[in-house]
Image (tube, helix red, strand yellow):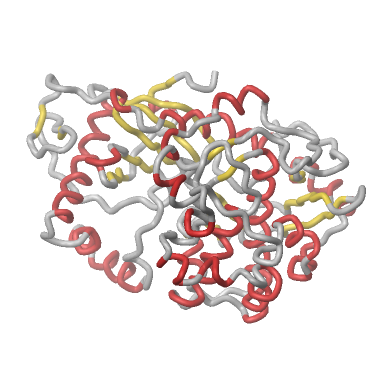
Amino acid sequence: MYDAFVPVEEVLTRIESVHCAHWDQQRIMVAFSDARVAKLCPADDDRLHWERKFVARVLNWLIDQNVTPCVTRHYGCVECSPDSAFGRVFWRKANASLNQLRQAETGSHTPFTSALSCLSPSQKVRMMADSSAQSVLSPLATSALATPRKKTSRPVRRDIGTDEPLSSKNNPVRLVGFVVERAPGVSLHRWAQQDHALHQWICVLFQLLYTIDAMRALGVRHNDMHWDNVFVDPRGWSESIFFVLPTTGDSNARFTILQGRPAVRIIDFDKASVVHAPLNGASLHQSLPHEWYDTLANNPILNNSLCTSYGMCNNEPNSKYDAHTVLCYLMRGIEQYQYRIPPSLRDWLNAQAMTSGQRLYSANFEGGGGFLCRLGKPFCSTGRSYLPSDDEQQPTLVLLTESDLFAPLAADLSAHTASAGTNKVFVHPECNLQIKLVDRR
């Protein structure tokens, strides 16, 4: 059911562009349409096996079970034949991207200037006006600018790591992968460098931390929650949405994100890990299907230095890992990239979120072998991820339900659900009282 392949053209009807990042090492391509993204790799070297299993199961489950709307929907596991009409179009665009990548790696020109060379004058003006246009964004949300090719009488493909063209009769490369929703908006890194009101920041940070903690309760760690794997859509949700969170005692806290306020999507789960839930002795009103904890137990990407140095490990619950990455990147963004974060939010980060956690995002962390806000080896002799104390970093659920920062989002759920529909109510897995939800179909 979850792992059956369908032809990619059944779920991705057109190709806007193809992006090939570090092809010789990773052998992964990303194809874009205006609303969907296909992530593909050669079938004989299936680097996407675990990620494909994860997204096929977990992403839609999180949305359909009313846990969180802040992930991208999965549309199917796919294959791409090089001899199909769609495959020929794909490889023609892929070759352009591969050629551009090879030119950049040989030093002839940078990817940015190469991309500019194929733009119209008006497009160049718009690109140059964007101060962050040269930043490298996640391939699952931002399409690469591929060099156009002239039409030829036959399809031309290039094998992995070679510049020699191949005919359709020699060494055909079948690709396999998956298709997901293309995250709307811009990366958090770009969004944070623009001016936004405090209430917009509060909405973004709430959705982000809520989703991180809801996944934590289910035993899911993203492990790579940097600023280009979070996307902010300034158009917001089409309707107001509501979140229910557990608090101390038997009560639940209720929050709302109004229609039109910024919407958040989390992308790129290739480094995710899954451990058996519930965690920390919590009582869950729902959890992932039991068999998934075995199916997704071991992400092979993490069985290397990602675990021993950076704390991205399999079978290891760490309730603060993903939240730390987000909070740390915000602090680094203020210091290094002039993030335009309102003063009151800066004070909250230092005075409440990470009161005594400065060492966890300082230059000394990187100097000791750490890497970009990861809780890894420098703070733990075992080489596994470090769990900050509550003084260093407050528990995420405490920040959400007890912090004054998010008080403006508090809502009387009963006053809205009759008109909005309870399919817009998302419930944290640790809530003491499960709210009965209507069928979303």
Instruction: Please give the name of the residue rendered at 73% of the width and 54% of the height, measured from the top-left corner.
Output: 240
Q: Position of residue 200 (x, y in %)?
A: 64, 68
Q: Residue furthest right?
A: 250
- Residue 184 visible in the picture: no
Closer to the camera in the image, 360 or 215:
360
Count of numbered badges drawn on the protein: 0
Q: What is the residue that sits farthest to the bottom in this orientation?
A: 343
Q: Quadrant of the C terminus?
A: top right
Give me the residue at 11% from left, 60% from top.
Answer: 108
- Determine whether 332 is above or below 10 in the image: below
- Looking at the picture, how far across and down is residue 67, in whole percent? 70, 41
Residue 317, compared with residue 195, is above or below; it is: above
Would residue 402 appear left or right of 360 to someone viewing this image? Answer: right
Task: Pick whichever, 382 or 219, lies toward us.
Answer: 382
**Residue closest to the far front:** 381
Q: 255 or 250: which is nearer to us? A: 250
**Can you say which quadrant of the picture contains the N terminus?**
top right
What residue is at 61 percent from the left and 40 percent from the top? 220
Q: Quadrant of residue 283?
A: top right
Image position of 151 (left or right of 282): left
| Residue appearing at x 54%, y 46% in the figure | 222
Q: Indicate left or right for 374 with 438 as reference.
A: left
Q: Residue 298 appears at what percent x and percent y? A: 50, 31
Indicate the position of residue 394 as horizontal and vertical percent values.
Answer: 70, 62
Q: Answer yes or no: is residue 215 visible.
A: yes
Q: Is residue 240 above or below residue 77?
A: below
